[in-house]
Image (cartoon, grey):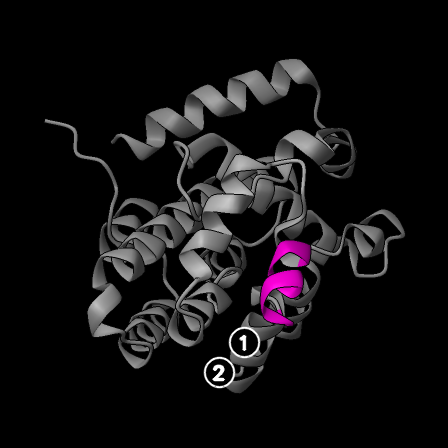
Amino acid sequence: MNEPVKTITRASDLLGLKNLSVLVTSLSLRHAIHIAERTTQLDSLWEHSARTGLALAYLAPKIRNIDKNTAHLFGMFHDAGKALMLQHFVDYPETLRLSANTPELNLALIEESRHNCNHAQFGAMLATAWNLPEVIVHGVRIHHDMDAFVSRLASDVTLSLIALVNLAEYIESDNSPFSDNQWSTYKKEFMAQLAISDHQLDALCITTKEMLLM
């Protein structure tokens, strides 16, 4: 019987990832950021991140020939700053609901208007503290800065990772409150970066969803 992929370990088994430090780092971060009264929300965030990482690792070598370990790591950690937002702002769940209800608005801008900071800033600080590769640190820092994306103020790999993570979330999110809702707004720009057609997109959506149900 097929089972949904809900854990980082299951994702690793399916992909055959060799870089065990990815698992050690992700699990350590999960335990380091612990909020007893919001365990359910954190569990949902980590499960969403694990599935996004799995989808990203599956897509990256097929579309842009990017190392799947790097893609997996970026997929899992690009939204790690949301855990800190949950930790420090009691009303952050309302911010996520507001973002989900207004997908045309940039989540980082909503966060800044309500909290004077955003999860991408927190995430980049975490990624730096955990000695993650610079391509990931930079990607985490700017993954909601669409002016930087459109102006190509990053390496091609970083821009591709940002486009890929938005595609992965579009495919696998199933209306998760932790989805960043950027694909529908910037689909044209993301598809141009990935150099894929609508036909290729449809095929990727089907095969990725099938993989996630293995």
What residue is shown at x 50% (from left), y 68% (from top)? Answer: 81
Residue 206 at x, y percent in the picture: 44, 19
Q: Is residue 127 left or right of residue 26?
A: right
Pointer 2 with pointer 1, Cβ within 8 A: yes
| Mark 2 surroundings: few (<14), some (14-19) or many (≥20) residues within 10 A | few
> In the rendered image, which residue does mark 1 sit on?
127
What distance separates the C-alpha of mark 2 from that of mark 1? 5 Å
- Judge whether 190 appears above or below 69 on screen: above
Residue 94 at x, y percent in the picture: 44, 53
What residue is shown at x 48% (from left), y 31% (from top)? Answer: 171
- Judge whether 198 appears above or below 140 on screen: above
Quadrant assignment, res 155 = bottom right
User: In front: 103, or 124?
Assistant: 103
What residue is shown at x 63% (from left), y 71% (from top)? Answer: 117
Disc sitting over residue 109 in the figure: none
Outermost bottom residue: 129
Q: Main secondary structure of the magenta part?
A: helix
Q: Secondary structure at mark 2?
A: loop
Residue 99 at x, y percent in the picture: 55, 45
Q: Is residue 143 left or right of residue 58?
A: right
> In the rendered image, which residue does mark 2 sit on?
130
Can residue 5 be seen at all in this image of the molecule? yes
Residue type at mark 2 is Trp
**Residue 110 lies within the magenta run:** yes
- Judge whether 183 appears above or below 11 on screen: above
Looking at the rendered image, the quarter that the N terminus falls into is top left
**Residue 13 lies within the magenta run:** no
Looking at the rendered image, the quarter that the C terminus falls into is top left
Q: Which residues are magenta?
A: 109-117
